[in-house]
């Protein structure tokens, strides 16, 4: 049986399901950079120039800077939270209230974390994160 192109005889599947406690660690500033990391290969024959394409998965990458509101959370606490999840995949959403970019939601791991102490009550967090292969 097919309804709208879906086979109703197949079991239901969930692509991903996340359960856990959300913690706001900062507010994303403008200038978020997103990119795709391709694991596909293109092999060119050196005699004839033909190309063989080997399709593989890809991962997304995000480089973002966030404002840490030290009245809501201490930057040392942000470091502690991130260190707990070092080497583990986590869900990060770089959308601020009022935005909903799907490419700013990622299930992956961070590769680089930096904080900048701008002033006594103003700190920035710079973070690079890569998703798992999709």
Image (cartoon, helix red, strand yellow):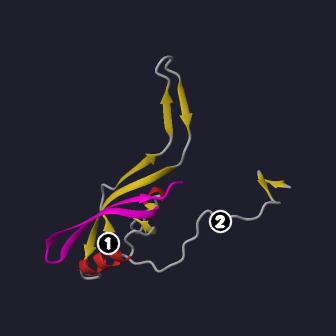
What's the residue at 54%, 72% (across, down)? 18
Seen in the picture, residue 88 relative to 39 is either above or below; the reply is below
Find residue 65 and report its horizontal and vertical position in percent: 28, 62
Residue 8, picture quadrant: bottom right
What's the residue at 48%, 45% (across, down)? 39
The answer to whether the residues at label 1 and label 2 have Cβ atoms under 8 Å apart is no
Write down the residue under mark 2.
14
Q: Quadrant of the N terminus?
A: bottom right
Q: Quadrant of the C terminus?
A: bottom right
Q: How crowded is mark 1: few (under 14 residues within 10 Å), some or many (20 or more)?
A: many
What's the residue at 43%, 48% (across, down)? 37
Find residue 58 and report its horizontal and vertical position in percent: 49, 49
Circle 2 SS class: loop
Write down the residue under mark 1.
26
Task: Find out whether residue 115 is within the magenta segment.
Answer: yes
Q: Residues within 10 Å of mark 2 (few under 14, many from 20)?
A: few
Q: Give the range drawn in magenta.
A: 106-134
Depth check, mark 1 against mark 2: the one in front is 2
Seen in the picture, residue 133 relative to 81 is either above or below; the reply is above
126 and 112: which is toward the camera: 112
Find residue 76 and report its horizontal and vertical position in percent: 24, 79
Residue 75 appears left or right of 9: left
From this viewpoint, which residue is outermost toward the right? 1
Residue 82 appears left or right of 102: left
Task: Find out whether residue 81 is within the magenta segment.
Answer: no
Look at the magenta stretch and give its main secondary structure: strand
Q: Earlier in the sequence, mark 1 or mark 2?
A: 2
> How far apart are labels 1 and 2 at the CA level?
30 Å
Circle 1 SS class: loop
């Amino acid at each position: 049986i097919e309804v709208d192109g879906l086979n109703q005889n197949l079991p239901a599947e969930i692509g991903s399901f996340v359960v856990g406690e959300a913690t706001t660690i900062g507010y994303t500033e403008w200038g978020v950079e997103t990119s795709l990391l391709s694991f596909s290969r293109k092999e060119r024959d050196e005699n004839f120039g033909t190309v063989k394409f080997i399709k593989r998965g890809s991962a997304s990458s995000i480089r973002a800077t966030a404002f840490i509101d030290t009245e809501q959370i201490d930057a040392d606490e942000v470091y502690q939270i991130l260190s707990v999840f070092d080497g583990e995949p986590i869900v990060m959403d770089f959308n601020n209230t009022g935005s909903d970019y799907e490419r700013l939601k990622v299930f992956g791991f961070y590769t680089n974390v930096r904080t900048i102490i701008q002033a006594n009550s103003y700190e920035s967090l710079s973070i690079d994160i890569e998703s798992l292969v999709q």
